[in-house]
C-alpha cells in the first residue's frame, strides 16, 4: 500500500523559527508510536509503503529532517546533534511520549544520536542500513564521513559544490544512483525519482547539500554512541547495499552485542524494496515496549 500526499493534507510544525513537515497516522490506535526518519536526499515520501500499513496497528509519525523534504532548508550547520534536538523537541511537543525510532542511512545515524543522548524519549531503536563513522584511527572530515568511503566515492568530488549539486539533482542521475543501490530495480519508479527531485528545487537546497558534504562539523563516532546506548537495538539490513555493506552491519553487532541483526534481500533502502517484511519486523519489535508505555 502506498500513500501520496496532497498539498492540502500537509502538516507543519514550527521549530526554532523553521517550518518542519511531518506525517501523523493511526493516532486513534493504542501502543508506543513509531517515528520514521528518512535518509539523505529523501523525505517522508520514502515511507509511502510503510506509513498506512503500520498505522493500522499503532500510531505512526514520519518527519522531514530539517534541510530535507518539505521542511525548511536554512543555511545552518547540519549535524547529528541538530537533528537530535529536532527529534527530541518533536517527541515532546507533538508526539507527547517516547517512541520507537526507526531511521534509514543518514536518518539512522541521527536516530542513534537521539537514542544515545535522550533515552527518555526512545523506547527502542531500529537502524535500516544506518550510516555513521566508525573509529579507524583517523578523524572524520565533516559530516560527509557519516558515509563510508564507497558511498563518498559517489558524492565527494573535486567540483564546486554548486556544480556538483546541479549534477546530482538531475532526474537521470537520481535514477542511476538509485539503480546502483536498489537490488529490486522495479522499485525505482518515476514517482520515487520525482519524490527525491522535488525538494532539490526548494530555496536553500544547494546550501544544504554543501553544508552536509563539505562544511558541517565532525560527527561523533558510531562506536562512541553505541557505547553510550542503553536501549534495545534492531538492525534491518539490506544485504546487497554497496554503500552500507553487511560487513558494516556486523561491525554494529560487534560494537553492540545485544543488537539483533536481520538481513534482507534488498539494497540500501529495505523499507522501500521489501516493505511488507520491514513493516512486520517493525510491528513485532514495537510490541515488546507495550508494557512500558507512557501514560
Image (spheres, rainbow, N blue to C red):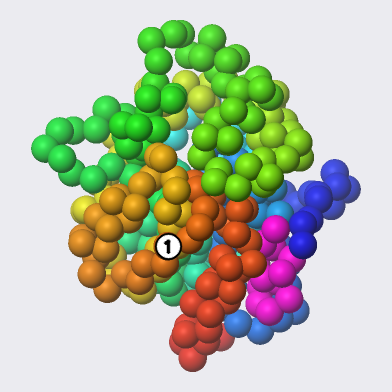
Q: In this view, does 51 lie to the left or right of 108?
A: right
Q: What stretch is highlighted in magenta?
A: 49-60
Residue 94 position (above or below residue 284): above
Q: Which residue is drawn at 38% across and 45% down?
A: 244
Give the image location of residue 76, x and y in percent.
Answer: 48, 29
Q: How crowded is mark 1: few (under 14 residues within 10 Å), some or many (20 or more)?
A: some
Residue 94 position (above or below residue 269): below
Please tell me in which quadrant of the rendered image residue 7 appears. Answer: top right
Viewer-proximal residue among 261 and 20: 261
Q: Disc 1 designates what residue?
A: 263
On-image quarter of the N terminus: bottom right
Viewer-proximal residue among 277 and 141: 277
41 within the magenta span? no
Viewer-proximal residue among 142 and 153: 153
Q: Is residue 84 left or right of residue 179?
A: left
Q: In this view, does 284 lie to the left or right of 13?
A: left
52 within the magenta span? yes
Amino acid at each position: 500500500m502506498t500513500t501520496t500526499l496532497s498539498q492540502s493534507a500537509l502538516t507543519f510544525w514550527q521549530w526554532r523559527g523553521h517550518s518542519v513537515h511531518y506525517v501523523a497516522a493511526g493516532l486513534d490506535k493504542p501502543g508506543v508510536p513509531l517515528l520514521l526518519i528518512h535518509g539523505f536526499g529523501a523525505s517522508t515520501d520514502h515511507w509511502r509503503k510503510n506509513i498506512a500499513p503500520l498505522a493500522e496497528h499503532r500510531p505512526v509519525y514520519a518527519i522531514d529532517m530539517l534541510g530535507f523534504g518539505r521542511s525548511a532548508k536554512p543555511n545552518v550547520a547540519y549535524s547529528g546533534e541538530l537533528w537530535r534536538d529536532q527529534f527530541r523537541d518533536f517527541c515532546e511537543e507533538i508526539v507527547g511520549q517516547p517512541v520507537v525510532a526507526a531511521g534509514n542511512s543518514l536518518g539512522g545515524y541521527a536516530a542513534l544520536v537521539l537514542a544515545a543522548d535522550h533515552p527518555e524519549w526512545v523506547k527502542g531503536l531500529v537502524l535500516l542500513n544506518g550510516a555513521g563513522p566508525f573509529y579507524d584511527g583517523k578523524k572524520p572530515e565533516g559530516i560527509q564521513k557519516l558515509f563510508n568511503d564507497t558511498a563518498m566515492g559517489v558524492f565527494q568530488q573535486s567540483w564546486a559544490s554548486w556544480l556538483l549539486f546541479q549534477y546530482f539533482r538531475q532526474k537521470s542521475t537520481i535514477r542511476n544512483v538509485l539503480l546502483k543501490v536498489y537490488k529490486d530495480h522495479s522499485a525505482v519508479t518515476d514517482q520515487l525519482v520525482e519524490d527525491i527531485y522535488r525538494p532539490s528545487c526548494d530555496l536553500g537546497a544547494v546550501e544544504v547539500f554543501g553544508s552536509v558534504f563539505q562544511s558541517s562539523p565532525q560527527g561523533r563516532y558510531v562506536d562512541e554512541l553505541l557505547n553510550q546506548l542503553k536501549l534495545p537495538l534492531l538492525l534491518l539490513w539490506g544485504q546487497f547495499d554497496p554503500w552500507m555493506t553487511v560487513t558494516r552491519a556486523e561491525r554494529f553487532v560487534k560494537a553492540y552485542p545485544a543488537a539483533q541483526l536481520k538481513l534482507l534481500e534488498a539494497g540500501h533502502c529495505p523499507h522501500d524494496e521489501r516493505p511488507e517484511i520491514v513493516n512486520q519486523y517493525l510491528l513485532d519489535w514495537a510490541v515488546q515496549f507495550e508494557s512500558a508505555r507512557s501514560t
